[in-house]
Amino acid sequence: MGQARIPPFLPGLSIAFEQLLVLSNPSDRPMNDPLLWFAFAIAIGFTISAIVSHSFAAVTKTETPFRMDVTSDVQRVAMVGLLLLAGPHILFRAANKSRIIGDWPAVYVWASYGLGAMWSFVLGFALLSVFAI
């Protein structure tokens, strides 16, 4: 591959053009680090989960989707989709509540935290994979 030449009629844009050439190399992109992908996937998954969970609670005036009566197949499918997105936040919230109250053994609480983190990672990784360039 040869070095790209900067057009002589655009001398003021030479720095921006060189930066564009540097960023076009896939190995120089900042999101190629697997640890960074992992951290962003967990953060994005938990954030999306919390947004969906709190939006549902604000719209329906209920604390959790488990307290809503499902009467039709359409509502059942919508509830499954909602729980797929809001599940990590609901699981973290239940584990935290049980940790404070003390009604679950510590192993159950930490297993719930771990499962919620893995679920957040899967949700965030799916979203990152869809929207990554």
Image: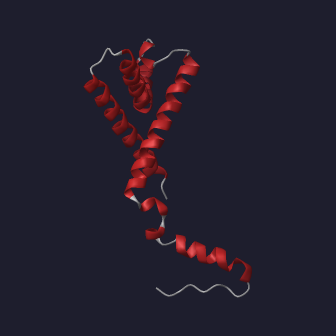
User: Dividing the picture into quarters, in which one does residue 114 lie?
Assistant: top left
Residue shown at the point (32%, 14%) measured from the top left: 103
Height in image: 87 above or below 45?
above
> Measuring 74% from the left and 85% from the top, which residue is drawn there?
9
Q: Is 11 left or right of 43, judged from the image as shown? A: right
User: Is 13 left, or right, of 52 in this rendering?
Assistant: right
State whether residue 81 appears in this view: no
User: Closest to the observer: 118 or 68?
Assistant: 118
Question: Residue at horizontal 28%, vertical 24%?
Answer: 106
Residue 65: x and y, percent?
45, 19
- Judge left or right: residue 23 versus residue 6: left
Counting from the top left corner in percent of width and height, residue 131 is at: 49, 51
Q: How many marks?
A: 0
* Residue 29 in the image, given as x and y percentages of width and height: 48, 65
Seen in the picture, residue 96 relative to 32 is either above or below; the reply is: above
Residue 97 visible in the snapshot: yes
Please tell me in which quadrant of the rendered image residue 6 appears: bottom right
Q: Quadrant of residue 96?
A: top left
Q: Position of residue 47 (x, y in %)?
A: 50, 37
Residue placed most toward the observer, 20 or 113: 113
Name the residue rendered at 29%, 18% in the picture: 104
Q: Is residue 59 above or below residue 26?
A: above
- The answer to whether 32 is drawn above or below residue 86 in the figure is below
